Amino acid sequence: MRFAIIAILMAACILKGYAQPDEDDRQVVGVAEFSCKENSPYTRLVTEKVVEMLTNSKRFRVVDRTSRDKITQELELQKSEAFIDSENLVEQDIAVAAEKMITGEIVKIPVYRMKNGDGTVRGYKASVAFQMKIVDVATGLSTEATSFEGKASDECLSPESAVTMAMMSLQDEIAEYFRVNFPVTAKLLKILEEKNGAAETILIKAGKKQGIKAGDKFHVESLEMLDGEVFPTALGIVTVTALKGEAFAECKVSKKEGKGICENFKAGKDIRCSLIIK
């Protein structure tokens, strides 16, 4: 009888997953635990810092694959009879499939003890160097490995804080790497102004939280599926004139491109706006 109840509850979880579609359209990015040529106890700190930087950008749904085994074990355990009456069950459809995976190899991660004249340890310094690349999960293709080398940290009270400081010296460099390799794409939500069947001002779903600013430009394309592949048709370039809230931007459309954008939008075409990287 209990096994029948378990089956019913599992089915309900599956139905719940279908009944409540995920409205978060941010790209899902996974981070695998970085490998290391050295047998260092601090390698995980590097991976955790990359996860933190991705998460803080608020542009992605970040999946920490370093703890995936623990999550899987917990989900399997909660399917057991012992948890049937628990009020703290994790939803069984919690797993999110990553579209891109970030992998890395730590080349060196030295940690130095700083000693007083009598030989006692007064603090620690560290540096870190690693390579990182992005793998497309669907195709298996990856970017070229990019090298990062942080500045030596100041003297810190613990090895962990020294490694963290060394990673923080790379924050801007890594942020730029993410910006270039994960270009912002946005939906065309609304035509705000049009004249004689041509769009003059449009609203797109990308704004301050994606790092968009006035003056940025977007490629606008209509998308269609041809023989199982996405086929883009260029519609023009639009320029951000104003940010609206955290997630939206108004864009100016040139006269010669406004008609095509307006026609495709009103025809219900799938339209993608991609940030032009300067």
Image (tube, rainbow, N blue to C red):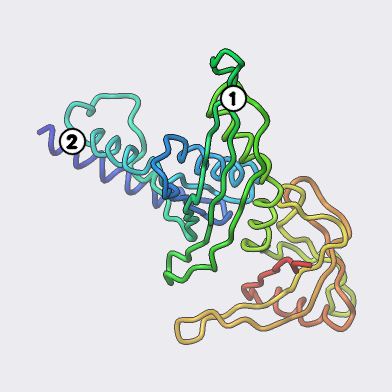
Instruction: Identify the amino acid type marked 1.
Output: Met
CA–CA distance in space, label 2 to label 1: 61 Å
Give the answer, above or below, for where 56 lies relative to 82: below
Q: Where is residue 206 in the image (x, y as percent from the top left)?
A: 72, 56
Q: Where is residue 204 in the image (x, y as percent from the top left)?
A: 74, 61
Image quarter (top left, top right, bottom left or bottom right) of the N terminus: top left
Query: Looking at the image, is mark 2 or mark 1 nearer the viewer?
Result: 1
Is 207 positioned to the left or the right of 185 in the image?
Answer: right
User: Of residues 266 and 36, which is closer to you in this image?
Assistant: 36
Check disc 2 and report the residue beneath it.
5
Kindly indicate the quadrant of the structure image that contains residue 273: bottom right
> Which residue sits at x=75%, y=46%?
246
> Which residue sits at x=62%, y=81%?
232
Kindly indicate the quadrant of the structure image that contains residue 4: top left
Q: How crowded is mark 1: few (under 14 residues within 10 Å), some or many (20 or more)?
A: some
> Which residue sits at x=69%, y=52%?
173
Is 50 positioned to the left or the right of 274 in the image?
Answer: left
In terms of secondary structure, where does tag 2 sit? helix
Instruction: Identify the amino acid type marked 2.
Output: Ile
| Mark 2 / mark 1, whichever is N-terminal | 2
Check disc 1 and report the residue beneath it.
114
User: Of residues 88 and 190, which is closer to you in this image?
Assistant: 88
User: Of residues 101 and 25, which is closer to you in this image?
Assistant: 101
Q: Where is residue 177 in the image (x, y as percent from the top left)?
A: 65, 57
Give the answer, above or below, for where 174 lies relative to 251: above
Outermost front residue: 117
Question: Quick check: marks 2 and 1 in contact, CB under 8 Å?
Answer: no
Q: Where is residue 61 in the image (x, y as percent from the top left)?
A: 54, 48
